Image (cartoon, grey):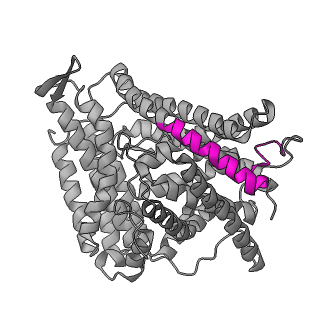
């Protein structure tokens, strides 16, 4: 997955403020989409539980370049939908910052990266599954691979534009350096894509109702509810 | 306390909560508002400060705070491995391409690679900054009761976000234990995380998939229980949050003053000849 593993002080105050403001705008839109403070208890509990699971999985490091790990944000997008998924990844980033997994000042930038994964995970899955009528595994794999590849380049873009403070490197040099990391993230993203594909197939076998929102109400029709709303109690 | 730690490199949330609830040090007695404001100040200071010596002084100060809180130093060193790993991962590419005086160089597949003094300095600065914030951040969470954190979260975050944050914090204990069980099971079957990612994706998918399905099922049960108990959309606050004392206000004033001075020195006019 893509995650900016930089700690506080890597970006200047200006860029920390820029990314935080953009993230705040996205979060506000997601909160508005969820009805502000009127979120149903069930959605709240599901989002919180997914955060807890996502955070636990997030911390399982795979020793590739020392800094890549599976975070399953595209899957969270598929299961929770884009707006609830957005709120969930923000909370995961807050927890992560508390233990040094990315700085507090990076929460904004990391939320943007993860929101891209959530959105693309959800909409790409929806397109592949409902639009192109592919199976669950190729849809899960494809959506995660697309989401994680794009987000890897979003990371490159954010770090290149922001530049590391104290570094005399030009943006071109920073871009070239970050491409190495993007390559590692994309490779891991493909692995995560396979994991996501299997997971979607697995969940589809035992709780297909959890996928109804992203699958457009199964293969029979269009979605009528958000993913979490669609799940039966 | 925890059955066992999730991993040595990641703080065990049960231990963090245990220390926060049972500690009696001066850091524990400090107002949560004071610690919260100081955390923000520390974050801003490490962003604004560029002088390595001042960053090292900051590290000494936050480490002193950690020690005053009577918190476990040996565990802290283990927990440093995560931020250190991340700094190394990213810096390693910048260290060898940063313009500066060459300290050491070699040829790798015909490509000239040189380690420069500025590259090393960049790495050290990023590392010290990371350790300053991680040390203080962990110290704050290990000296502040859950009820106080809950109070601050519900006062500072939008209600929906605060609720997700507080609920997920509680759920994290269960899910972390479940992940620990899964990892133990994986190792017991001679599995390996590196191999697992590439060769045992189906196994990983089953494990993680089941974790998500369990999460949904638990969440549905919990939601029903919450509604049955009359949950109205906001968690009640039981404990009153202590306001900062005179000492707390002094510390905050000092931090604000320091931030103002270094910001002025960096962005307006060099005050101290740094």
What is the x, y in percent for residue A108?
50, 44
B183 left or right, relative to B82: right
Task: State the residue at coordinates (33%, 51%).
Answer: B83
Q: Is residue B136 magenta?
A: no
Q: Is residue A214 magenta?
A: yes
Q: Is residue B87 above or below residue B154?
A: above
- B129 to A149, vertically: above or below: below
Tell me, yes or no, if residue A109 can be seen here.
yes
Image height of B19 relative to B265, above or below: below
Would residue A81 be found to the left or right of residue B145 on screen?
right
The residue located at (33%, 57%) in the rendering is: B134
Instruction: Pick out the residue farthest to the top.
Output: B110
From the image, which quarter does the N terminus of chain B lie in?
bottom left
Q: Determine the main secondary structure of the stretch shown in magenta.
A: helix
Please identify the quarter of the rendering in which residue B6 is found.
bottom left
- Say which residue appears at 32% left-offset and 40% top-offset: B89
- Most extreme residue toward the front is B189
User: How many marks are shown on the rendered structure?
Assistant: 0
Determine if residue A28 is in view.
no
Query: Residue A74, located in which quarter of the rendered image?
Result: top right
Residue B239: percent from left, percent from top = 53, 81
Quadrant (top left/top right/bottom left/bottom right) for the C terminus of chain B? top left
Relative to the observer, which residue lies in front, B167 or B254?
B167
Name which residue lies at 77% across and 52% down.
A208
Residue situated furthest right in the rendering: A221
Compared to residue A64, the image places residue A34 above or below, namely: below
User: Which quadrant would residue A173 be assigned to in this image?
Assistant: top left
Q: Position of residue B267 (x, y in %)?
A: 30, 36
The stretch of residues the image draws in magenta is A188-217
Residue B272: percent from left, percent from top: 16, 42
């Amino acid at each position: 997955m893509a995650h900016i593993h930089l700690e506080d002080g890597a970006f200047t105050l200006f860029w920390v403020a820029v990314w935080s403001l953009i993230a705040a705008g996205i979060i506000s839109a997601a909160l508005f989409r969820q009805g502000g403070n009127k979120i149903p208890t069930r959605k709240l509990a599901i989002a919180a539980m997914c955060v807890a699971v996502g955070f636990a999985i997030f911390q399982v490091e795979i020793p590739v370049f020392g800094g890549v790990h599976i975070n399953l944000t595209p899957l969270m997008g598929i299961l929770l939908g884009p707006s609830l998924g957005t709120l969930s990844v923000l909370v995961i980033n807050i927890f992560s910052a508390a233990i040094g997994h990315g700085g507090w000042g990076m929460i904004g930038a990391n939320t943007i990266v993860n929101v891209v994964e959530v959105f693309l995970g959800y909409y790409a899955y929806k397109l592949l599954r409902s639009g192109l009528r592919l199976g669950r595994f190729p849809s899960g794999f494809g959506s995660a691979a697309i989401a994680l590849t794009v987000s890897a380049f979003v990371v490159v873009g954010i770090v290149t534009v922001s530049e590391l403070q104290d570094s005399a490197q030009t943006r071109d040099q920073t871009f070239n350096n970050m491409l190495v990391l993007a390559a590692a993230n994309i490779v891991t993203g493909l692995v995560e894509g396979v994991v996501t594909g299997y997971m979607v197939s697995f969940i589809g076998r035992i709780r297909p109702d959890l996928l109804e929102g992203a699958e457009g109400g199964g293969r029979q029709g269009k979605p009528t509810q958000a993913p979490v709303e669609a799940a039966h109690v | 306390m925890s059955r066992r730690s999730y991993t040595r490199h990641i703080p065990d949330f049960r231990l963090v909560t245990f220390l926060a609830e049972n500690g009696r040090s001066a850091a524990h007695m400090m107002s949560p508002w004071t610690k919260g404001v100081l955390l923000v100040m520390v974050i801003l200071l490490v962003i604004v400060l560029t002088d390595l010596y001042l960053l090292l002084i900051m590290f000494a100060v936050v480490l002193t705070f950690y020690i005053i809180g009577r918190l476990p130093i040996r565990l802290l060193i283990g927990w440093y491995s995560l931020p250190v790993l991340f700094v190394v991962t990213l810096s390693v590419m910048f260290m060898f391409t940063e313009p500066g005086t060459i300290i050491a160089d070699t040829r790798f597949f015909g490509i000239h690679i040189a380690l420069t003094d500025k590259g090393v300095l960049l790495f050290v600065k990023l590392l010290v900054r990371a350790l300053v914030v991680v040390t203080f951040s962990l110290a704050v969470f290990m000296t502040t009761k859950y009820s106080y954190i809950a109070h601050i979260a519900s006062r500072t975050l939008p209600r929906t976000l605060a609720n997700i944050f507080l609920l997920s914090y509680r759920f994290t204990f269960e899910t972390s234990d479940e992940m620990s069980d899964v990892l133990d099971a994986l190792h017991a079957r001679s599995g390996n995380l590196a191999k697992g990612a590439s060769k045992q994706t189906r196994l990983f998918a089953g494990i993680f998939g089941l974790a998500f399905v369990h999460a949904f099922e638990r969440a549905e049960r919990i939601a029903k229980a919450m509604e049955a108990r009359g949950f109205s959309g906001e968690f009640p606050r039981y404990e009153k949050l202590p306001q900062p004392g005179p000492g707390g206000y002094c510390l905050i004033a000092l931090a604000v003053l320091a931030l103002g001075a270094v910001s002025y020195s960096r962005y307006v006019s060099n005050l101290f000849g740094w």
